Image (cartoon, helix red, strand yellow):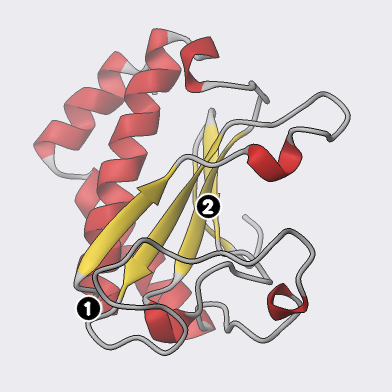
């Protein structure tokens, strides 16, 4: 498992980006990436779709518990990759929202600067190694709960 990876199974991995779109001071940022690339969630098999939901539920819950965020935003974005070779790739952003925010405005949709803006070149802090370790442990604990085990069975895991 890569250093910045907090979860991985046969279909997906969840990573902490080196250059996040949402600073850890504002609640943090993780990304759920499908290993076999598809352009849209409707292109997934039913097993992958179940696993996608299972992971998003567990990661969101772990961010609430570990990071103490007030709200979780699940953002299915892909516009910046639309002109890439092969087009946009389906992925899911987890954007935690802290009660007190530095770069964002509480109660408002997350503000993003344009692709390539210098704010994404190191200004926004990624989650710390300690936070990533705590998230890994909590995700594993959550996924051992009965409903997540049943979802894993349906997903063929």
Q: Which residue position holds label 2?
A: 31
Q: Which residue position holds label 1?
A: 68
Front residue (pair 105, 50): 105
Front residue (pair 24, 110): 110
Task: Please tell me whether residue 56 is drawn above or below residue 90 in the rendered image.
Answer: below
Q: Can residue 140 be spotted in the picture?
A: no
Q: Residue furthest left?
A: 146
Local crowd size for mark 1, using a 10 Å CA cut-off: few (<14), some (14–19), many (≥20): some
Q: Can residue 114 be spotted in the picture?
A: yes
At 40% from the left edge and 62% from the top edge, which residue is drawn? 95
Determine which quarter of the picture holds residue 17. Answer: bottom right
Local crowd size for mark 2, using a 10 Å CA cut-off: few (<14), some (14–19), many (≥20): many
Front residue (pair 121, 137): 121
Determine which quarter of the picture holds residue 146. Answer: top left
* Residue 112, position as x, y percentages in the image: 56, 64
Which quadrant holds the C terminus?
top left
* Residue 133, position as x, y percentages in the image: 44, 74
Front residue (pair 42, 137): 42
Task: Please tell me whether residue 71 is drawn above or below residue 74 in the rendered image.
Answer: below
Badge 2 vs badge 1, beta-carbon distance below 8 Å? no
At 47% from the left edge and 9% from the top edge, which residue is drawn? 45
Label number found at residue 14: none
The first of marks 2 and 1 along the sequence is 2
Give the structural element (helix, strand or loop) at label 1.
loop
* Residue 124, position as x, y percentages in the image: 60, 82
Label 2 – label 1 distance at C-alpha? 18 Å
At 61% from the left edge and 38% from the top edge, which residue is drawn? 78
Which quadrant holds the N terminus?
bottom right
Give the structural element (helix, strand or loop) at label 2.
strand
Determine which quarter of the picture holds residue 81. Answer: top right
At 27% from the left edge and 19% from the top edge, which residue is drawn? 153
* Residue 115, position as x, y percentages in the image: 74, 58
């Amino acid at each position: 498992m890569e250093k910045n990876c907090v979860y991985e199974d046969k279909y997906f991995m969840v990573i902490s980006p080196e250059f996040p779109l949402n600073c850890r001071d504002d609640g943090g940022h993780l990304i759920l990436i499908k290993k076999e690339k598809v352009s849209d969630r409707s292109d997934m098999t039913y097993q992958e779709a179940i696993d996608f939901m299972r992971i998003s539920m567990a990661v969101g819950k772990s961010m609430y518990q570990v990071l103490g965020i007030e709200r979780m935003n699940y953002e299915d974005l892909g516009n910046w990759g639309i002109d890439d070779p092969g087009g946009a790739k389906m992925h899911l952003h987890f954007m935690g929202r802290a009660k007190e925010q530095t770069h964002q405005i509480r109660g408002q949709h997350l503000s993003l600067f344009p692709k390539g803006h210098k704010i994404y070149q190191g200004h926004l802090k990624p989650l710390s190694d300690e936070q990533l370790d705590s998230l890994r442990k909590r995700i594993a604990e959550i996924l051992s709960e009965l409903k997540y085990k049943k979802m894993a069975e349906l997903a063929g895991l």
